[in-house]
Amino acid sequence: MKKTTALLLSLICLCALVGCAAKSEVKIDYGASALYSKEEMDAAIEIIKSEFSTWDGCELHRIYYVSDDACNPETVAWMNELKAPDDTTAPFTQCILFQSDFHSPKKGGAWNADQEYTAWQWWLARTDGGRWQLMTWGY
């Protein structure tokens, strides 16, 4: 009986430890868009996630689409201004804005230590039907 109880307690402890080590899921909110399909948004989100994965110690919680209103002629012009001077690709014709919520590392580093960041902006741009390019991010 003691062996069975000990084994059962060991399994419970092991399950608890595995649960603590599991990474949290990133919540994605696609909002409502008349401009972009879920697949187009997913392509942009993968670029955001790729950049975010280089941020040591940060934990991404949520990525959400802002609105179609962000893709207007003024913003597209701004995206074109952000291009490198020697970039010979066609001018951008579309842009997309996502925001994210994430938690900074306990030791801080480049971030305020152990803090929740909300509404962190991610701007991407592309030519019609082209690949998204991450142009800028931050507050």
Image (tube, rainbow, N blue to C red):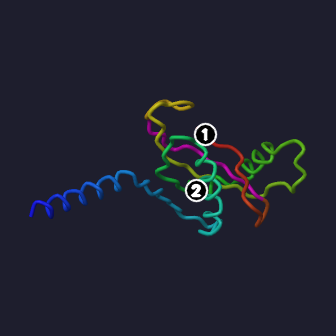
Up/down of 24 relative to 34, above or below: above
Q: Can you identify the residue that label 2 sits on?
A: 67
Q: Which residues are magenta?
A: 115-126
Looking at this view, name the residue that lies furthest to the left.
1
Quick one: SS at disc 1? strand
Q: CA distance from mark 1 to mark 2?
A: 17 Å
Answer whether residue 118 is magenta in the image.
yes
Quarter occupied by the C terminus = top right
Q: Can you identify the residue that label 1 sits on?
A: 138
Relative to 137, 103 lies left or right: left
Q: Amino acid at mark 1?
A: Gly
Q: Quadrant of residue 45?
A: bottom right
Q: Amino acid at mark 2?
A: Ser
Relative to 41, 12 lies left or right: left
- Mark closest to the chain's N terminus, 1 or 2: 2
Q: Residue 38's x, y, as percent? A: 59, 68
Quarter occupied by the N terminus = bottom left
| Mark 2, other Cα within 10 Å: few <14 / some 14–19 / many ≥20 | some
Give the label on residue 53, or none.
none
Q: Residue 133's x, y, as percent? A: 73, 54
Taking the spot 56% from the left edge, 56% from the top edge, the residue there is 65
Answer whether residue 91 is magenta in the image.
no
Which SS does the magenta portion mostly show? strand
